[in-house]
Image (cartoon, rainbow, N blue to C red):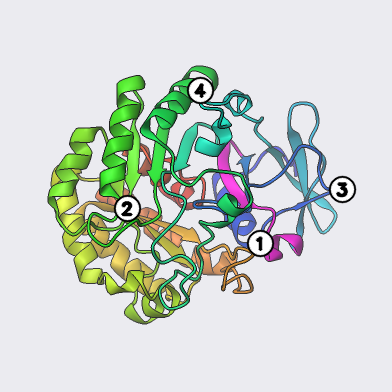
Amino acid sequence: MNPSRLSETGSARLIAELQSLGLRLEDCTAGVSARRGGAGPTDHKAVTVAGRTVMIPIATTSAYASPFIASPPDQHGISVVHRAGKAIAEIVFPRQPRFYGLQTKDGVPYSHIATLHSKDVLATTLLQSCIRYGNRQTACQFCAIGQSLEAGQTILRKTPEQLAEVAAAAVALDHIKHMVMTTGTPNLTDRGAKILCESASAVKAAVDLPIQGQCEPPDDDSWFMRMRDAGIDSLGMHLEAVTTEVRSRIMPGKARISIQRYMDAFDAAVVVFGRGQVSTYILAGLGDTPEAILSISQQLINKGVYPFVVPFVPLGGTPLAQHPAPTAEFMVKILPQLGSMLKKANLMSHDIKAGCAKCGACSALASYEV
């Protein structure tokens, strides 16, 4: 087999396996490192597999024991992945973005304000804290939002001015195509919608860049219109887990926002942002069955909401650090069927204006939409 050529089915399966099992780097592969801690895909590295750039765990417990081993990349970033001594695929490690070499007018490294996800997505956590983080009774057990702050890799609160400056530079220097703004939850009222509005408005005044905002459902649906008017093009409100038992056990504070409230908020948000421009993250492997995930996904699709199902990644320093990642077999019970459901409904990731589901790097789901 030529390791540089994979069938569509073969590449989708390989991505699913790599995202479940992780990737070992041979001889501590030079120039390849993962972002440790924080929000979003952490302990991961962007890797291009069969033309798709995806996020692969390289600094997790499962990754250190992975059967997949990547050789040191050549001068073009090309590496060969081996399994059981056999070369199975060529991958590419994208270069570090140019904007990482700069700092803001007030002296903060650009990489502390926003980071590159995948190959053309700029991502930022507006508030690197949460009202629940560190509280055993309410914190989400998978969350590592405070780790990058403790490590000095970011700052607590990114100002609108800093975000606008970094976004403009990232577009000019690295051809960024869209931006993700997420936030730790600052309160139990607007739940982050206010700082999303302030930040999106500043970025849109500086550069024409599609933006996804991410927050929990605010207490007042009028925030959806305010967010859209501020320049947010698509919205993410993340369920993470889909059954009451799992939500209560894994994220006891967030679970106080009922699934019904999420469903009502999805309905209101779709009216404002449009069908296909509202999405939700679902973490497979926390305890929900494939059947439960597919059932709620169909409900979401019927509402015009894109269910972005990704494999759970256990992060060091969190209560779930030793929780097993889902197997590739578990993910394959979900993703092909979900891809068919999305295609049948004509609710496709490539039609989303901005955000995690459009990027698609944290899941093999988009490979099953074809």
Q: Amino acid at mark 4?
A: Lys
Q: Nearer the viewer, mark 2 or mark 1?
A: 2
Quarter that holds the C terminus? top left
Residue 159, above or below 307 = above
Q: Secondary structure at mark 4?
A: loop
* Mark 2 nearby-residue class (10 Å; few <14, some 14–19, many ≥20): some
- Disc 4 target residue: 105
Work out whether residue 209 or residue 219 is closer to the camera in this orientation and state it.
219
Q: Secondary structure at mark 2?
A: loop
- Disc 2 target residue: 215
192 with respect to 223 (left or right): right
133 with respect to 234 (left or right): right
Name the residue at 33% across, 73% down.
255
Residue numbers of the magenta segment: 50-65
Name the N-terminal-most of marks 2 and 4. Answer: 4
Answer yes or no: do the residues labelled 4 and 1 have beta carbons within 8 Å? no
Quarter that holds the N terminus? top right
Q: Which mark is residue 27?
A: 3
Q: Amino acid at mark 3?
A: Asp
What distance separates the C-alpha of mark 3 from that of mark 2?
40 Å
Q: Secondary structure at mark 3?
A: loop
Q: Secondary structure at mark 1?
A: helix
On the image, which quarter does residue 138 sit in? Answer: bottom left
* Mark 4 nearby-residue class (10 Å; few <14, some 14–19, many ≥20): few
Answer yes or no: do the residues labelled 3 and 1 have beta carbons within 8 Å? no
What distance separates the C-alpha of mark 2 from that of mark 4?
28 Å
What distance separates the C-alpha of mark 2 from that of mark 1?
29 Å
